[in-house]
Amino acid sequence: MDTGKALSPFSRVVDIFGDGTLWAVSTPGHTRDHLAYLINTIPTPILIVGDAELTTWAMQDGILVSTVDGARGKQEVQRSAAMIRTFHAAYPHVQIWFSHDKDHL
């Protein structure tokens, strides 16, 4: 993702439509160009994390996803997971949807 801005705790996000309803969130690690999406739905916003966090229990227990990018990928997995977890702690009303889990936070 070459464009975007920081939106704490995320280092790079892009407002897809320019109206704040859908944000692409850079969450590299599992793959170099992995994205999560923040959807500002009413009454409950949703953060779809895809493969940046695989399941509710993995996120709660601090289990990290695998990477295809060696040591660099491992560092990015840790950084992306930390940002997602920080976001969840700051905004507990936002649902977190996972790619490998029917449950969400």
Image (spheres, rainbow, N blue to C red):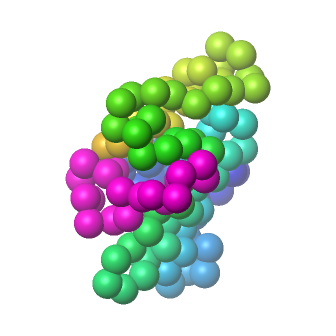
Tell me where residue 90 appears, x and y as whole percent: 24, 53
For image coordinates 45% across by 58% down, the residue present is 103
Q: Is residue 96 magenta?
A: yes
For image coordinates 60% across by 52% down, the residue present is 99
Q: Nearer the viewer, residue 62 or 28?
A: 62
Q: Residue furthest front?
A: 102
Relative height, residue 78 to residue 105 (above, below): above
Q: Is residue 24 magenta?
A: no
Magenta-highlighted residues: 87-105
Relative height, residue 49 to residue 30 (above, below): below
Tell me where residue 91 appears, x and y as whole percent: 26, 59
- The quarter of the picture where the C terminus appears is bottom left
Tell me where residue 93 appears, x and y as whole percent: 26, 66
Q: Is residue 79 visible?
A: yes
Q: Nearer the viewer, residue 6 or 41?
A: 41
For image coordinates 32% across by 84% down, the residue present is 43
Tell me where residue 42 appears, x and y as whole percent: 36, 86
For image coordinates 60% across by 49% down, the residue present is 100
Q: Is residue 17 left or right of residue 58?
A: right
Relative height, residue 80 to residue 94 (above, below): above
